[in-house]
Every structure is written in structure tokens, then in C-alpha cells.
Image (cartoon, helix red, strand yellow):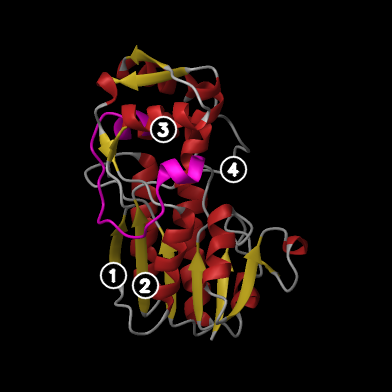
Amino acid sequence: MRVGVVGATSRLGQCAVEALAEHEVVPLLRRPDALPGARRLDLGDPTGMGEALAGLEVVVSVAGAPIVPWPVLPRVTFEGIDRDGHRALGVAAAHQGVRRVVYVSVFGDGMEHLAYVRAHHEAEAALQEAVPEVVAVRPVGLFGAFDQLVPMARLGLGFDLQGGQARTNPVSERDLAAVLAQAVVDEAPAGVQAVGGPDVLTRAQIWDLAFAAQGRGGVHLPSHPALLTASAHALRLVDRRAADVLDFLRCILTHDGIAPQVGAERLADYWA
């Protein structure tokens, strides 16, 4: 089976390519010279998108606007990349006879008012309108997203919003890639699939794991959600996408986000 992977150079994309080793994988990248046999596909520019998808049976997309709370290129927004880019991908896929799209969305139950979550869920709907079979995989969080805690953990400092008691169960990129590979085959039902890892952890426990990985203890500094809210308001004047990220972070750091548990990799082992 010929399977295209949008965003194949990311950590999750590399794991997806490995998990799809039994298929003929075609990387779909903004910079196709990054991998042998890659084709150019830019979610921010639909030009040539149909040509990139020619001859593919299934497309797996792990690409999207970066979920980092600092400015990037002004045109890189969740609406422009995640929603509109995948809408264009769906139209091009339909024209090329692609029968199934596997899309990595975001969990975000009860958070549809947030731009980051809303753009992903609207992308799901756009793909479902265009392509016969769509599997929207909604991870509750990836291990790699927590790497941003490491520099602070090295200093022995962690920040807890509302006591750090909000719970979540992040999943490793490798375990999520296995879910994506299963979703490629005909037997996997189309629809929405929420995915989490094997361990349900509070945010405070996640900081403790980060401290332990550095071989030290740490101090939990109390913080208030209002600080993130104020920062988002100020940042919105400069970069709306980065402000939307802060809004999303405030929400997930103060509310439980727990998805069905899959895989076996644990955050403690990943950091170790």
C-alpha cells in the first residue's frame, strides 16, 4: 500500500514512518530535499498539493502549526495551517482518489471554545466532508511536548497552577505511531479515536518525574491561571497564535484531560 505521511521529519512523523515500514511510504514535506523520495506538500500553500498526492491510497497527517508559546511566522496560524490546510488536503486527496486520511487532531474535550482545539476539530469535519474514510486520532498529549519542562527542572524549579492537581495521561510518539499505523488499514473503523498513555499523572507528578530525570529534587512554585490569561492578552497584540497557545495551556493545566489508555511506554522511562 502506498501511504503518504505529511510531516514525516517531526518526531512523531519519524515514528509513523517506522511503524508503517510494511507499506510503501512517501514523505510529504514542505522541504522535500530533507528525505529521499519525498514530495513537496505545504499545508500553508495548496499549490501542487494534488500532484503530491498522486498515486497514494492513504494519507497520514501529523503536521500542524507549532504548539509553542512564542511568535513564529505571522502566516502560520491554527486556522490557516491546521484547519484551512487540511481542508485543502481533503479536496486534493478526493480529486486524486485517496480513500482514507488518518489525521492527528487534539483531544480537547470541553475545550472547543479554544482556537487551537476548534481549528483541529474543524479540520476533522472538513476532511470528513471530502474523503470517504477519515480516522481522526486525538492524543491527549505527547511525551515530546513535556521536553519544554527540562530546562526548568535542571534548575530545580517547577510551576504548579492550582496546586498542580489537574490530571492527564500523555502518550509516547512511538505508541501513538502504532495507533496511526493500525488506522491505515481497512479493518480499522473510520471516526474519532481518543488516545492516551498508560499512566494517569497530576501535573505536579510530571514535574517530579522531570526533577528525578535530572537526578535531583525540586521546588514547586505556586502560580495562578490569571498570569497566563494576562500574558495571552498582551501577546495577542503581537502574535495571535502564540496567545492561543497560552490560552490552551491555561486550560489543560487546570482541567483533567484523560483519554483511553494505550501502549506501554512511560514518561519516567522516556526521560530517563
Task: Please identify the residue farthest to the right as the structure is shown.
Answer: 33
Say if residue 237 shows up in the picture: no
On screen, residue 254 versus residue 120, left or right, reads left
Q: Earlier in the sequence, mark 1 or mark 3?
A: 1
Q: Determine which residue is flagged by label 2.
A: 134
User: What's the mark number on residue 165?
Assistant: none
Kindly check if marks 1 and 2 are in contact, taking CB atoms under 8 A apart as contact: yes
On screen, residue 8 versus residue 169, left or right, reads right
Look at the image and give the residue range highlighted in magenta: 249-272
Would you say the magenta stretch is mainly helix, strand or loop? Answer: loop
Q: Determine which residue is flagged by label 4.
A: 75
Quadrant for residue 268, please give it. Answer: top left
Q: Secondary structure at mark 4?
A: loop
Nearer mark to the viewer, of 4 and 2: 2
Kindly report the distance in space between the C-alpha atoms of the residues bearing marks 1 and 2: 6 Å
**Amino acid type at mark 3:** Leu
User: What's the mark number on residue 191?
Assistant: 1
Q: Determine which residue is flagged by label 3.
A: 209
Nearer mark to the viewer, of 2 and 3: 3
